[in-house]
Image: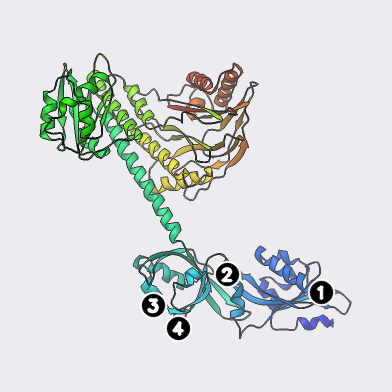
Amino acid sequence: MDATDVYLRRVEPSALLTLEGSVHSLNAPMAATLGRPADQCVGRRTEELLPVGQRAILELLVDHALSTKRLAMRVMEFPRPGAAPVVCLVEARPVTSAQGLQLVWIHVLDTSNDFGSLLIPFRMAAEAADLALCSYVPEGNRIEWLGGAPALTALIPSTGVSLSWMVRRIHPDDREGLRRLMRSSAAESPWFTLRFRTDEGDQRHLRCHTRRIQLGHGGPERTFGVIRDDTRSEERQQAMMAALGAERQRTAEITSFASALISATTEQELRQIVLTRLAATFKGTGALLAFVHEDHLQISTDAGIPLALANAARSVSLDASSPLPYAIRSGEPQYLSGRAEYVLRWPQGVSAPWLGPDTALSVTPLGPAGDQPLGAWMVTYERPRRLSGDEQALMNTLAGLAGQALKRIRWQQACVQLANAVQQSMLAAPPDSLPGMEVAVRYRCGFGGLDIGGDWYDVFEEPGGTVVLVIGDVQGHDVDAAALMGQVRASMRAIAAHATEPRTVLTRTNELLLAMGVPRFASCTMLRVDPRNGRITGASAGHVPLLRVRDDGGYDIHQLRGGTVLGVLPGARYEQSDFTLDEHTSLIMVTDGIVEGPGMTLEAGLRRTGASAAAALSDGLGAEGVADRILDSAGTVGHLDDIAVLVIRLTGG
């Protein structure tokens, strides 16, 4: 009998390892702990028998024993298929066989009188990760607090509390989650969020999950809980969702207003649309609508307009010197922030009975100055108010839509122009100047009358100087597609303010669309460009590939990493790609109407567009000229879809 056999004649798991880390021999308890028959363990390296996290611990343990020629101890965790893992205190020491073979003896120590020693590494890891550790003791129906992050341990008044005490502190809607955590028969539970009320009455969002662990060889099983305080993260998420919700609501209201204007079929319907929505959209107290009819004004108001103002408007002539007829004649909006500004610009109105000390108003023409003026609308405010530039732009856009609707109703014309106006009102113009970059954007609506498409683009500069470019396409060609397009575009811009990586923005936008429950999907490409060095990070959600076009007339098709289209697959994650753009190469982003249709496959369309753009660059054209060339050549595709184009070129400035 080999002298080393004595090391294996133990009731605790034991094994002898070679200096190379292979199993020389082991006893039955160790084979059972490893979850394999003994003959499948002998001769195999320990890294084949242990999970990744435990391999490193064992290697350190063995190295320490060999380097010091003394025994060494570490806590290790052994997984067991279909059962709770076993946590043991393992000792290692160098030994020599009768044949002079140098071995390392590892064996599990008896910790039946000191289970606390097994938990020390878990407490230290919890504290380092800003977590708390606790255990559930079913015999006393108690939760024992084992330590961890001080801020979390301070939530519990002592080292142990009854389960009933904890239940009383948990929000009623979350108590079932706590019961499932405590009663889970699985080795590891999913994570649950529990709202916990502190002694001060504050509510904390605690993220919890449990693990069943056997303490030592042949020891008892216990349920341990890991707790993370997600209160700040939850508050940030709620704030972000509130901001997104407000932005979505605002976008939905504006889109609904614009869509209703487009859908109006009579002047009476148009009046109803304007007077029921206008004041609310711009947070005013009243709305007035004036149509020019046979050289006089037809006045309609909502209930918020003072009777004296309504009567004054009905009696005014088109050539009078007052804000309403002047805006109609000149095509220039009149934004009057209060009585003082009104009297300064229109002194003859000083005695107007409706003009109170705090009255403000805005008057917006329904079209530009011309031979056939259309009319104007007015919004009144009970307090001094100066509209921002964005509000003025939106007011002008919607008023323009109302004017176009009035033209269509009267003359049954300009259907395509109306659709294009809606789409353009929801597409932000790129910044006037982007240092180091030249960006050209183009959009053209489809040729289906009042059909509205879901194509969009967006360009905006981040505080650090990087530029974000987005292009995408919402499924469908109707008002709902345009509405969803506006929501997706606004949501992506809001998310990008908090998450700079394109893959993160796409992931969260996908989650948002799924949460909204809309029966549509959207494809999209997002790029984040640093003009200073040409570094680009991009991701695609099932969108058309990019084109990289060179000054020498060459081009290549660049497929970004990414994932599936947005709004289809729950839990979808998106990859991203990094690449560099130099000053001799332009980047082309398009929607499918440019490159795919009944008359052309996607691959053929990409080749045609790449060749057309490369020829434009060879001719010395800049980004604007390249965009025009691409738009002009799109007709050969044979597609009636709306189309969008983005051309990016570094200038080195």
Q: Which mark is residue 164?
A: 3
Question: Is residue 273 visible from the viewing direction of this image?
Answer: no
Quickly name the residue at label 2.
82
Q: Earlier in the sequence, mark 4 or mark 2?
A: 2
In the image, what residue type sits under mark 4?
Gly
Placement of the N terminus among the 4 image quadrants? bottom right
In the image, what residue type sits under mark 2?
Gly
Q: Earlier in the sequence, mark 4 or mark 1?
A: 1
Q: Which mark is residue 140?
A: 4
- Real-space CA distance between mark 3 and mark 4, rounded to the nearest whole angstrom: 11 Å
Q: Residues within 10 Å of mark 3 (few under 14, many from 20)?
A: few
Q: Is residue 286 left or right of residue 134?
A: left
CB atoms at circles 3 and 4 under 8 Å apart? no
Q: Earlier in the sequence, mark 1 or mark 3?
A: 1
In the image, what residue type sits under mark 1?
Leu
Tell me the SS state at disc 4: loop
- Real-space CA distance between mark 1 and mark 3, rounded to the nearest whole angstrom: 53 Å
Q: Is residue 463 left or right of residue 378?
A: right
CB atoms at circles 1 and 2 under 8 Å apart? no
183 above or below 301? below
Tell me the SS state at disc 3: helix
Q: Which mark is residue 103?
A: 1
Q: Earlier in the sequence, mark 3 or mark 4?
A: 4
Which percent across, then down, holds residue 476?
A: 40, 34
